[in-house]
Image (cartoon, helix red, strand yellow):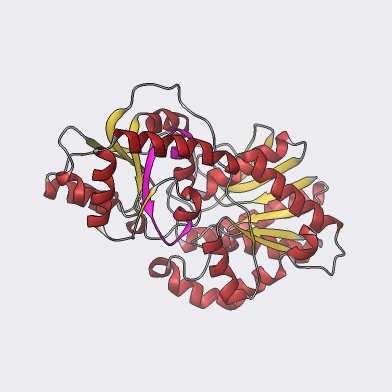
């Protein structure tokens, strides 16, 4: 198959959706398919490169930050991405369009589909879904909801990484998404002695809950350190909070992806105390490297870890402290959870996930053009 992938974020740009897109694209190439990606360009990146067999076209837009963007910046990407994608379709043969993020990727896919007749698949990632990140995107979704619904209903299939996110897509659209997880990067570091370290890796936004980890840090044993890796608009506030509390927190900033396995492997405990997630890649990466995990109930985090982690309610620092203390005090429990994580994560490996998408694609391509739902694709 020849696949045109639309994703405004692709490594080294972006958060969790970007490595999910990359992992799927590279796995599909390894399975013998051709994948062409249209994504965003920033000054330090080439307009075109082939990486791991994937053709990556980066188009100019007004994006200023690698790990955070605005609605206006997304709109500028839609214009240039549609132009480039149209050129690619006119120059070559594609069997299907796969757009990551209903907004903005789905907008480009919908317009391109109407021009070319190519069918498209959508993958939702979170902020592109009404109700997922209402405090940040609520007004925009309210304005765009009629067109958002049109884009979703025009897709031959919609996928979501978790049942939690699938339900958020279904409610306003009436479309039943296919649940296919994000592919896990199973790259691991060479085993070595772990530090007495609680690690958090995240794009630093308020909903990620790192402020709750900082709040409880002064009450952790003094021989344990807390390390936070990542960047984002919430970082200055987190630094101020740590300083005001006298919390022993080491902020690493953005860590290159190739260095993350070693960082995960250095920590006894990994935590993501987020209030809302779809299917976080950082949990998959921490699981692959055998961390004991503390995360939150009620969204995609729980679906990723299953019973292989300690779960707390979002926004409850006392519960987070209790869970961390339980693992800090119990070497056996930490090892048990770490070993369980390593075993569980293999069901989310890139080849397994890519095979699920391959089946979906083939069903759509084989189905009559009047068929627009995923039932025929999965038959």
Is 107 included in the stretch rendered in magenta?
A: no
Is 298 included in the stretch rendered in magenta?
A: yes
Residue 278 position, x and y percent, is 49, 57
Q: Is residue 225 left or right of residue 305?
A: left
103 up-or-down from 22: above or below? below
Residues drawn in magenta = 285-301
**Which image quadrant: the C terminus?**
bottom right
In this rendered view, identify the residue nearer to me: 353 or 361. 353
**Which image quadrant: the N terminus?**
top right
Q: Is residue 7 left or right of residue 239?
A: right
Q: Is residue 173 left or right of residue 226?
A: right
User: Image point 57% across, 52% down: which residue?
Assistant: 8
- Where residue 70 sits, quadrant-wise, is bottom left
User: Image point 38% across, 46% down: which residue?
Assistant: 202
227 up-or-down from 323: above or below? above
Q: Is residue 146 left or right of residue 314?
A: right
Residue 74: in sight, yes or no?
Answer: yes
In this rendered view, identify the residue nearer to me: 188 or 211. 188
Residue 335 position, x and y percent, is 37, 33
Residue 303 position, x and y percent, is 50, 54
Residue 203: in sight, yes or no?
Answer: no
User: Image point 86% across, 56% down: which residue?
Assistant: 366
Residue 112 position, x and y percent, is 73, 61
């Amino acid at each position: 198959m020849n696949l045109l992938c639309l994703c405004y974020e692709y490594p080294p740009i972006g958060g969790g959706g970007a490595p999910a897109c990359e992992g799927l694209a590279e796995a599909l190439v390894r399975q013998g398919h051709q994948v062409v990606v249209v994504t965003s360009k920033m000054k330090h990146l080439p307009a075109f490169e082939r990486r791991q067999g994937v053709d990556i076209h980066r188009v100019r837009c007004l994006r200023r930050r690698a790990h955070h963007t605005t609605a206006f910046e997304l709109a500028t990407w839609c214009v240039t991405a549609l132009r480039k994608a149209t050129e690619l379709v006119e120059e070559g043969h594609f069997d299907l369009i796969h757009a990551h993020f209903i907004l903005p990727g789905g907008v480009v896919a919908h317009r391109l589909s109407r021009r070319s007749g190519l069918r498209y698949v959508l993958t939702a990632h979170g902020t592109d879904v009404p109700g997922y990140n209402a405090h940040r995107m609520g007004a925009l979704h309210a304005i765009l909801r009629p067109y958002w619904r049109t884009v979703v209903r025009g897709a031959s299939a919609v996928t979501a990484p978790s049942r939690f996110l699938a339900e958020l897509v279904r409610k306003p659209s009436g479309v039943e998404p296919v649940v296919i997880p994000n592919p896990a990067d199973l790259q691991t570091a060479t085993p070595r002695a772990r530090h007495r370290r609680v690690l958090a890796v995240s794009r630093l936004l308020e909903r990620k809950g790192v402020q709750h980890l900082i709040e409880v840090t002064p009450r952790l044993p003094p021989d344990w350190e807390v390390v936070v890796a990542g960047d984002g608009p919430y970082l200055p506030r987190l630094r101020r909070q740590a300083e005001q509390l006298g919390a022993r927190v080491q902020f690493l900033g953005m860590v290159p992806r190739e260095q993350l396995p070693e960082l995960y492997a250095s920590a006894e405990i990994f935590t993501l105390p987020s209030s809302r997630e779809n299917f976080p890649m950082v949990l998959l990466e921490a699981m692959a490297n055998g961390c004991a995990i503390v995360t939150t109930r009620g969204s995609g985090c729980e679906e990723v870890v299953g019973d292989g982690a300690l779960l707390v309610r979002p926004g409850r620092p006392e519960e987070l402290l209790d869970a961390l203390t339980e693992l800090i005090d119990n070497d056996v429990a930490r090892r048990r959870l770490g070993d369980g994580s390593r075993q569980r994560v293999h069901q989310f490996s890139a080849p397994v996930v890519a095979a699920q998408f391959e089946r979906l694609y083939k069903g759509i391509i084989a189905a009559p053009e009047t068929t627009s739902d995923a039932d025929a694709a999965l038959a």
